[in-house]
Amino acid sequence: ENIVDEIVRECARRGGAVTEPLVGFIVRAVVLDPRNEFEYDQLLSSQDVQKLKELCVEKLTEKCSPSLDTIKMQLYFD
């Protein structure tokens, strides 16, 4: 939850308005994506947490991202 709050604040600082459910969804997606090399069944190190935050903020503040727009629509209708 703390990570989600920090990501929401960083996105707001960069001019992006995001909701906690959206951030939570993106955090889970980033952790489960094997390309990011997170061990989702283990505790994250402080370096892992920093990497996770950076990846999520980058994803959430992308301009013209059809995949992000699709996720937002899915969450809206859930």
Image (tube, grey):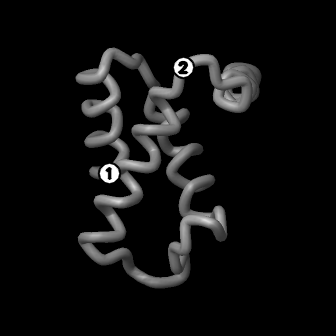
Q: Is residue 19 above or below residue 33?
A: above
**Amino acid of disc 1:** Ile
Residue at the location (65% across, 70% down)? Answer: 34
Tell me the quarter of the picture where residue 20 sits. Answer: top left
Residue 62 percent coordinates (x, y) = 52, 27
Taking the image as shown, residue 3 lies to the left or right of residue 40, namely: left
Element carrying mark 1: helix
Q: Residue at point 36% right, 48% down?
A: 54
Crowd tier of the residue under label 1, counting other residues whose Cα lies within 10 Å: few below 14, some 14–19, many 20 or above: some
Q: Is residue 78 above or below residue 41?
A: above
To which residue does mark 2 refer?
63
Residue that carries the numbered disc 1 in the rendered image: 3
Does any portion of residue 78 appear in the rendered image? no
Instruction: Indicate the quadrant containing the C terminus: top left, top right, bottom left or bottom right.
Output: top right
Q: Could you say where residue 65 lies in the image, as x and y percent from the top left?
A: 65, 25
- Mark 2 vs mark 1: give the one in front: 2
Residues at marks 2 and 1, CA–CA distance in whole angstroms = 22 Å
Query: Where residue 76 is drawn, which disc sits there?
Result: none
Query: Residue 41 placed where, x, y %?
Result: 54, 82
**Quarter of the image where one finds residue 73:** top right
For disc 2, the neighbor class at 10 Å (few under 14, some 14 to 19, many from 20) is few
On the picture, is 76 further left or further right than 41?
right
| Residue in front for this viewpoint, 76 or 11 | 11
Q: Residue drawn 62% across and 18% down?
A: 64
Precedes in sequence: disc 2 or disc 1: 1
